[in-house]
Image (cartoon, rainbow, N blue to C red):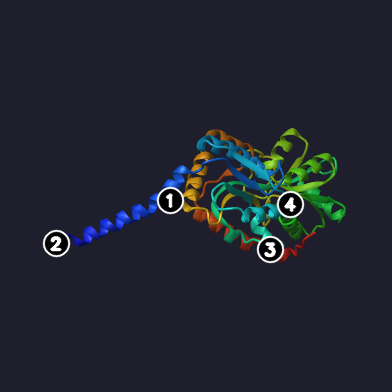
Amino acid sequence: MTNRFRPTRRRAIQLGAAAVLAAPALARAQAWPSGAITFLNPFPAGGGTDTFARPLAAQLAEQLGHQVLIDNKGGAGGTVGASQAAKARPDGSLFFVGAVHHTIAPSIYKNLDYDLEKAFEPITMLALVPQVISINPTKVPVKTAAELLDYLRKNPGKVNYASPGAGTAHHLAAELYKLETKTNIVHVPYRGAGPAMQDLLAGNADMMFDGMGTSAQQFKAGRLLGLGVATPKRLAAFPDIPTAAEIGIPNWQVSTWYGLWAIKGTPPAIVERMYNETVKALAVPKLKEIWAQQTAEPGGESRADFAKRIRSEIEKWQKVVTAAGVKLD
């Protein structure tokens, strides 16, 4: 009789031990946060990352009962801020809110002092926004994508495009466009999408291959003109803007996505709670409305799927960089 119940008793002891070991992690997650949290945004204020990070931070502050602050640290296509975040203490007080640009950086910057996949713990994608050809109609006298292509071919090297910096998705979207259309457009890198957009609106730049998140409001206001989206289907919010295939560039498929990472070494229970809180926040109607206004697909994918996305994007952009012969300006 004793032998019959021994495995059951052993299993009970094992479960009890596991519960004891899990208790400190659970306690840490429940006690966290004990103060303000910082989202380090490696781009200047006013860009696409800010568009999604700030509403999310406000919602998370409501849910967690503590401030969630945005710290903008722009420079070098987002790598300056990423480098700083990579060296932060992994105690759950600071998280990194970045973008697809950081999966491009390893192919562009040969001396990065951090490794995206080793320095950070993926939490989830926040939003996915299509790229769009955005022009200042006072600088580029065209009204359609076909007219733009004709104008670029007749004026090689005379038209410039602004980007948030070398190695960003905006930069690579432009280089892929140039590769596919055999055109010559001059790259003018800025320290973020905000400054780039300001100069485009001021007429100091001619055009931009932009994330729809920052161009959408300018299209609606009539300040800029959208000539093509790098998507398979037209966008419901802008049904008059043709797709890449419709303007004769079917291989020009580019989207900018934004994501949230923890610092590697952050206690797993805290990382998991931030994931759950973020997914909860993304489902709140007011955030869903903000995302819709930016023509963005909502995030919230699993941590494992986000990690797979990061690895896939790193491999994809390495091929584009090589094919286009992209070099730092």
Whole-percent x, y for residue 277 in the image = 50, 42
| Horizontal side of residue 88 vs 305, given as left or right | right
Residue 123 seen in the figure:
yes
Alpha carbon separation for disc pair 2 and 1: 35 Å
Label 3 sits on residue: 107
| Horizontal side of residue 13 vs 141, given as left or right | left
Label 4 sits on residue: 75
Residue at left 54%, top 48%? 92
Q: Earlier in the sequence, mark 1 or mark 3?
A: 1
Label 2 sits on residue: 2
Whole-percent x, y for residue 67 in the image = 58, 37
Q: Earlier in the sequence, mark 2 or mark 1?
A: 2
Alpha carbon separation for disc pair 3 and 2: 64 Å
Label 1 sits on residue: 25
- Residue 101: give its label: none
Query: Of the residues shown, which amino acid type is indicated by label 3?
Result: Ser
Query: Of the residues shown, which amino acid type is indicated by label 4?
Result: Gly
Whole-percent x, y for residue 217 in the image = 70, 36
Query: Of the residues shown, which amino acid type is indicated by label 2?
Result: Thr
Query: Of the residues shown, which amino acid type is indicated by label 1?
Result: Ala
Mark 4 Cα within 10 Å, few/some/many (few <14, many 20+)?
Answer: some
Q: Nearer the viewer, residue 268 or 312?
A: 268
Whole-percent x, y for residue 327 in the image = 77, 63
Mark 3 Cα within 10 Å, few/some/many (few <14, many 20+)?
Answer: some
Q: Nearer the viewer, residue 261 or 48?
A: 261
Q: Earlier in the sequence, mark 4 or mark 1?
A: 1
Alpha carbon separation for disc pair 4 and 3: 17 Å
Quadrant location, the N terminus = bottom left
| Horizontal side of residue 209 vs 269, given as left or right | right
